[in-house]
Image (cartoon, helix red, strand yellow):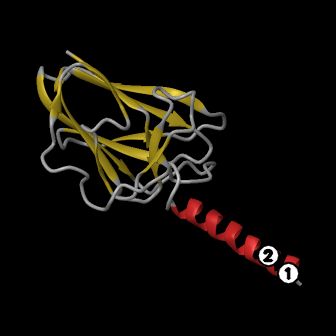
């Protein structure tokens, strides 16, 4: 009888741990709160910036995940909630957006300085780490890049996920 009771308690505890992990509570993954993650958007100069850099501002439910050694800094941050957005202010003449293409990826909408959206289909049958999309030809100076989860996907994709691996800013 005691073993049966302990077995039931253990089963409930395992289910609770799995539920917490699936919802992002506890452990490595944690949701960035609703609304922009910082106050004023800080502008950075030329260089390489990872998804976890404090200069990247997230709005919505983004998940930082540190289990991908193939990514630029061994982490990516992702969301599949339509409308979730991240932005990054930089001083330069070009920026490269680094992301992952995979089976569960959707379409990202990228804007620079509030201009027309460039749609990037992040779907791929085979995972493509550190995929790069360069935005050049900008006037030298301050710019803001914004990436939004469009809520749309390639028909073959199994999800709507959009991610950030890194940025490279050129002078």
Relative to the observer, which residue lies in front, 128 or 60? 60
Residue at screen point 19% across, 15% down: 171
On the image, the x and y values in percent for residue 15 come to: 68, 69
Asked if the residue at tag 2 contacts the one at tag 1, i.e. Cβ–Cβ closer than 8 Å, the answer is yes
Residue at screen point 11% across, 29% down: 142
Q: In the figure, residue 128 lies in which quadrant? A: top right
On the image, the x and y values in percent for residue 34 come to: 31, 62
Residue at screen point 49% across, 51% down: 29
Q: Is residue 85 above or below residue 71?
A: below
Q: Is residue 75 above or below residue 91?
A: below
Number of other residues with Cα within 10 Å of mark 2, as a class: few under 14, some 14 to 19, many 20 or more? few
Q: Which residue is mark 1?
A: 2
Given the current orientation, which residue lies at the most extreme top position?
Answer: 171
Q: In the figure, residue 51 lies in which quadrant? A: top left
* Image quarter hosting the N terminus: bottom right
Relative to the observer, which residue lies in front, 1 or 100? 1
Left or right: 5 with respect to 71? right
Left or right: 117 with respect to 2? left
Q: Which residue is mark 2?
A: 6
């Amino acid at each position: 009888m005691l073993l049966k009771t302990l077995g039931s308690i253990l089963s409930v505890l395992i289910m609770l741990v799995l539920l917490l992990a699936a919802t992002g509570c506890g452990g490595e993954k944690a949701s960035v709160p609703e609304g922009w993650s910082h106050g004023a958007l800080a502008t950075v100069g030329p260089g390489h910036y990872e998804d976890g850099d404090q200069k990247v501002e997230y709005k919505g439910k983004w998940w930082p995940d540190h289990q991908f050694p193939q990514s630029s800094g061994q982490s990516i941050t992702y969301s599949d909630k339509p409308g979730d957005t991240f932005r990054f202010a930089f001083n330069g003449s070009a920026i490269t957006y680094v992301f992952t293409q995979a089976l569960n990826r959707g379409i990202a909408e990228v804007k620079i300085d509030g201009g027309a959206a460039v749609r990037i289909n992040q779907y791929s049958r085979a995972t493509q780490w550190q995929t790069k999309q360069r935005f050049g030809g900008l006037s030298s100076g301050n710019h803001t890049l914004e990436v939004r989860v469009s809520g749309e996907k390639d028909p073959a994709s199994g999800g709507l996920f959009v991610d950030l691996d890194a940025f490279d800013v050129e002078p």
